Image: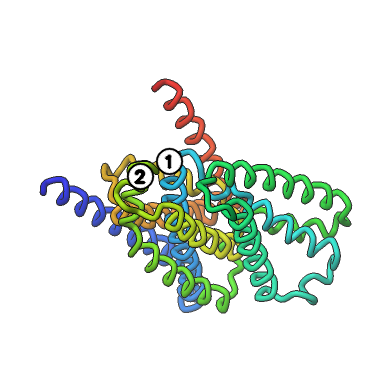
Amino acid sequence: MEKTITIRRSLLIALLLMIASAALFMFYKMGNSWEFALRFRGMKVITIIVVAGCVAFSSVSFQTLTNNRILTPSIMGFESLYLLIQTIIVFFYGDQTFKVLSHVDNFLVSVIGMIAFAFMLYLMIYKKGKDNLYLLLLVGIILGTLFSSLSSFMQLLIDPNDFFIVQGKMFATFNKINSDLLWSSLIIMVIILIIGFRMSKYLDVIALGRDQAINLGLNYNRVVKIFLVLIAILVSVSTALVGPITFLGLLVTNLTYELFKTHRHSVIIIACCLVSAIALLIGQFLMERVFNLSVPISAIINIVGGFYFMYLLLKVKKI
């Protein structure tokens, strides 16, 4: 009972911190055009909430499925494929890219491409009905490396002036958000999170281990496939909406586990969404107000996440 009260208190504190971070970001130095500032910053806050929800659920679920807290869905090659798609588009259309493909078209091509890649990968690995999760990870890593190599090769062939278009896609940004894409992404995220939250009890069982989960009557392979599909959709939507943020999932999930001493995924998922939103709000605030837009938010997150990743590796090694 006391532990439940402590967890609820921690969730309330995290919620208040998120609200405070959002308020600071929304109302700090609005200037005379406060209506425009509120509308513009409000879109950013909603985008941050969407990305936070996608990253939090996909990272927590993926780490539970793999039983490894230093892995994130980016290891499957989604971000590398996203950059490859953007590079191919610019390679063929050059400076006419924005005339040929609108932001909506680009978003759809990216999302459909990443989801199709995930489904193809899942079908290839699971076609025999066996538990091949680690083979899936290995193939994902290899394909991710292949996509990165192809992107780098094609970027060398692109006109230097056109390369700036690709370069703009390499880092996540919350400054150029299409409202139509945002609302569509929000709807998708809400639907997936509702499904995922209702299935969070299965993650509690999967966390016990494959053999224990099967002994408890769980259809392990079927549940894992469902979660992999949900993860693929969320990662695709998040990456196509703002761009890749490699270390965000690693950072926020491990911070959540450190702050909330529980293994109930119904709590961890909510807590991780709040922690993700706080991290992105603070990161975006620092980028705009401290670094004056000179440093992309993904660089800030990746630097902090990279150091934290090294800390986790050294911690595991000591244990």
Q: Residues within 10 Å of mark 1 (few under 14, many from 20)?
A: some
Is residue 115 left or right of 183 when viewed as pictured?
right
What label sits on residue 205 in the rendered view?
none
Q: Residue furthest front?
A: 128
Image position, residue 92 (x, y; %): 86, 65
Horizontal arrangement in the rendering, residue 240 relative to residue 34 (left or right): right
In the rendered structure, which disc, 2 or 1, sits on the residue that comes first in sequence? 1
Q: Which scheme is used to colour this image of the protein?
A: rainbow
Which residue shows up at 69% across the image and 75% down it?
Answer: 105
How far is the residue under mark 2 from the one under mark 1? Answer: 7 Å
Q: Is residue 195 above or below residue 243?
A: below
Nearer to us in this view, 75 or 254: 75
Task: Give SS at disc 2.
Answer: loop
- Residue under label 1: 67
Q: Decide if residue 55 is in sight here.
A: no
Who is closer to the viewer here, 75 or 31? Answer: 75
Neighbours of disc 2 within 10 Å: few (<14), some (14-19), many (20+)? some
- Image-based side of 220 in relation to 293, left or right: left
Percent position of residue 102, x then y: 71, 76
Residue sitting nearer the eye, 262 or 129: 129
Quarter of the figure with residue 168 = bottom right
The label number, if any, that marks residue 207 in the structure image: 2
Q: Quadrant of the C terminus?
A: top left
Q: Determine the residue positioned at 46% across, 53% down.
A: 221
> Which residue is rendered at x = 33% and y = 64% of the image?
198
At label 2, which amino acid type do we have? Ala
Labels 2 and 1 touching (C-beta < 8 A): yes
Task: Check the image and name the residue furthest to the left.
Answer: 1
Viewer can see residue 80: yes
Disc 1 marks which amino acid? Asn
Seen at 16% across and 46% down, the residue is 3
